[in-house]
Image (cartoon, rainbow, N blue to C red):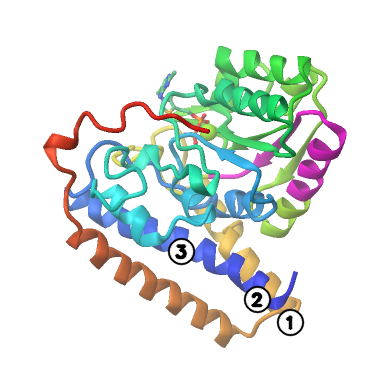
Amino acid sequence: MEKNDYIELFHQMMLIRLVEEQATLLYQQGKIGGFLHLYIGQEAVSTGIISSRQMQDRIITAYRDHGVAINCGIPVKVVLAELLGKVTGCSQGRGGSMHMADVGKNFWGGHAIVGAHLPIATGLALGDRYKGKDAVTICMFGDGATNIGYFHEALNLSKVWNLSVLWVCENNHYGMGTSVERASAVSEIRQKAEGYLIPNSCVDGMDLMKVREAALDAIETVRTQHTPYFLEVETYRFRGHSMGDPERYRTSEEVKRWQNEEDPIGIYHKYMMDNNIASSEEIDQVEKTAEREVESGLQFAESSPEPLPEDLYNNLYMEIG
Ligand SMILES: Cc1ncc(C[n+]2csc(CCOP(=O)(O)OP(=O)(O)O)c2C)c(N)n1
Ligand SMILES: [Mg+2]
């Protein structure tokens, strides 16, 4: 990677964090309807995975999707507009927080039903096989999703047909208020892939460079060896499951330890300094640029119109070539 590439990755993680801090305020002001699941703490996962894809590779994820949307290249102002339910949002204000999408950028959406997008990933990859496309489908999901029936059906068929799917489990240790150990008979989640003879590995998800290295290897394996691959990424969400989570299932000491010692943005900042990639002044500039982008994006989103009631029944079905 060139210097600018390293800086762009920092820029993307900063944007995710700042957009979500802004979203917290907007939610408290009652401007965001429905649920709001924040990705703060997990920024290195989507940034590392998505920066490792080629543009023909598809991305699909669950409802914790703002970071993925930004990494896929949806402008911050369009993400903010979607959060506010405005017609200029990436889903024309109909999807909101959990249903960001832009098929033109090969982002096949955030999905609210736990596990339900895994069979869709298998289907996308089957479609690519039929059409002879050299594309990898990258499917991201939480630890909780691995206890759902869809997970097993989707993994099984992906191996039966040796489809080009990279399964990425974001193990943030909890599904809502339930820890992995209380919900899953297998606490080392990647072992579940063994049951379907899918090659697998586990990586530290707080270190962007480690995530990228693992993702590049995994995507290469899928593309060249025509097999699904399972990558478990160990991470942590710094905020509650969604807004208004009283967080009785974990101690504030545990949260503080991760925030202080494992902050992905802090770890990457240090990496750039230690390796003389950028000076602290240059990194400050990137932060300032990101702040300005979020500020002007907010103005755009707030001043955008709401969808029209008469358009309610448009775009319910569409043909995808
Ligand atoms: C089928 C289904 N069951 C239950 C829910 C309620 N629910 C929403 S998020 C969630 C936890 C999922 O945890 P995980 O997959 O680990 O993702 P994380 O929230 O940690 O990113 C549950 C149970 C749902 N949305 N869909
Ligand atoms: Mg989880």
Res 101 quadrant in image: top left
Above or below 89: residue 147: above
Image spot of residue 196 (x, y percent): 77, 16
Image spot of residue 319 (x, y percent): 44, 29
**Ligand 1 within 8 angstroms of badge 3 C-beta:** no
Give the label on residue 310, or none: none
Q: Residue furthest left?
A: 309
Give the label on residue 4, or none: 2
**Type of amino acid under label 2:** Asn
Q: Which residue is mark 1?
A: 276
Res 281 quadrant in image: bottom right
Image spot of residue 41 (x, y percent): 52, 52
- Return the residue nearer the eye: 261 or 67: 67
Residue drawn at point x = 71 percent, y = 36 percent: 133
* 3D distance between C-alphas at marks 2 and 3: 16 Å
Q: Which residue is mark 3?
A: 15
Q: Return the disc, 3 or 1, that comes first in the chain's sequence.
A: 3
Q: Return the disc, 1 or 2, that comes first in the chain's sequence.
A: 2
The magenta stretch spans residue 229: yes
**Ligand 1 within 8 angstroms of badge 1 C-beta:** no
**Type of amino acid under label 3:** Leu
Above or below 116: residue 47: below
Q: Mark 1 falls on what kind of element?
A: loop
Image spot of residue 315 (x, y percent): 31, 32
The magenta segment: 214-236
Residue drawn at point x = 65 percent, y = 42 percent: 234
Query: Is residue 181 visible in the rendered structure shown here?
Result: no
Query: Is residue 117 visible in the rendered structure shown here?
Result: yes
Locate residue 278 relative to residue 107 in the image: left or right.
right
Q: Mark 3 falls on what kind of element?
A: helix
